[in-house]
Amino acid sequence: MITIPSGRVTLSDRRTRHSWAVDLAPYRLAAVPVTRAWYAEVTGAHPGEAEGKRLPVESVSWWEAVRFCNAVSRDRGLTPAYRLRSDERVEWDQSADGFRLPTEAEWEHACRAGTSGPRYAALDDIAWYRANSDGRVRVVGGKAPNAWGLHDTLGNVWDWCWDVYDPEVYGTYRVLRGGGWFDEHWSCRASARRRSHPTFRVDDVGFRVARSGA
């Protein structure tokens, strides 16, 4: 995992036209999305139809991503970050040292890696998207990383984030970031936001893991 330095990121919501700044302490984020091999090792499951150990796992729901984080934490003797309640709610223990999903502010800060534009380099150099993916998910780390060493933050698969998207309109829908192999170039931007129900599964959505602290 890569240590991401502290910083400030400004998020915005198109519907409300509201922007807000978030200050971030240092944290750690995986250099690539969770692979099919790692997901299978931890869960015994093989979601989706694509085959290849180094492909990013996809067709996983937000709930499955959260459960994966807790399972890895337990396997490594760490305190799980999430408390899963019987009423299908989840609580994040922010004092826990275990694995978790990044917040969308953490995700965007890490994706930008100190840049301010929509992308940190030319899109074809850093991302698998509709114009170059040949209509399929690709092996992680196959494109150039950003300045902090993170691959596939844009393109390949969307990343689930911790945050609720817009509870007033979408209820429990969670945030997705980054764009995927099926998306046009305008969806593969550091600021692009998408949302879906936490039970949603599709073949261009995966996740990467984070941990609190440097």
Image (spheres, rainbow, N blue to C red):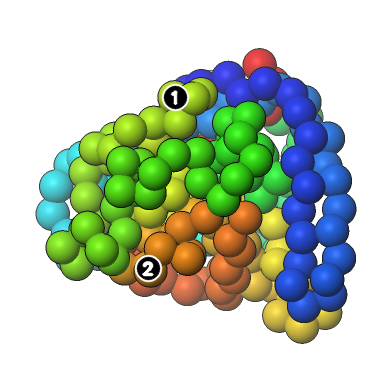
Q: What residue type is labelled 2?
A: Asp
Residue 176 in picture, x, y percent from top left: 55, 61
> Which x, y percent locates residue 74?
51, 31
Cβ–Cβ under 8 Å for marks 1 and 2: no
Question: Of residues 7 and 208, which is closer to you in this image?
Answer: 7
At label 2, counting other C-alpha atoms closer than 10 Å, the crowd grade (few under 14, some 14-19, many 20 or more) is many
> Which label belongs to residue 164?
none
Q: Which of marks 1 and 2 is nearer the N terminus?
A: 1
Q: In this orientation, which residue lies closer to the viewer: 109 or 32?
A: 109
> At 76% from the left edge and 67% from the top edge, which residue is drawn?
13
The quarter holding residue 50 reads bottom left
Q: Cα distance, mark 1 to mark 2?
A: 23 Å
In this rendering, does residue 86 appear at all?
A: no
x, y (%) of residue 194? 57, 68
> Mark 1 belongs to which amino acid?
Gly
What residue is shown at x 24% (from left), y 37% (from top)? 142
Tell whether 78 sits left or right of 57: right
Q: In the rendered view of the protein, which quadrant contains the C terminus?
A: top right
Mark 1 residue crowding within 10 angstroms, few (<14) / some (14–19) / many (20+): some
In the rendered view, would you say 3 is above or below 190?
Answer: above
Helix, strand or loop at mark 2:
loop
For the residue pair 145 and 64, the one nearer the viewer reads as: 145
Q: What residue is at 51 percent from the left and 46 percent from the top?
A: 119
Q: Quadrant of residue 82?
A: top right
Q: Where is residue 117 in the image (x, y as percent from the top left)?
A: 60, 45
When asked about the image quadrant of residue 202, the answer is bottom left
* Local secondary structure at mark 1: loop
Q: In the rendered image, which residue does mark 1 sit on?
A: 149
Which residue carries the number 2 mark?
183
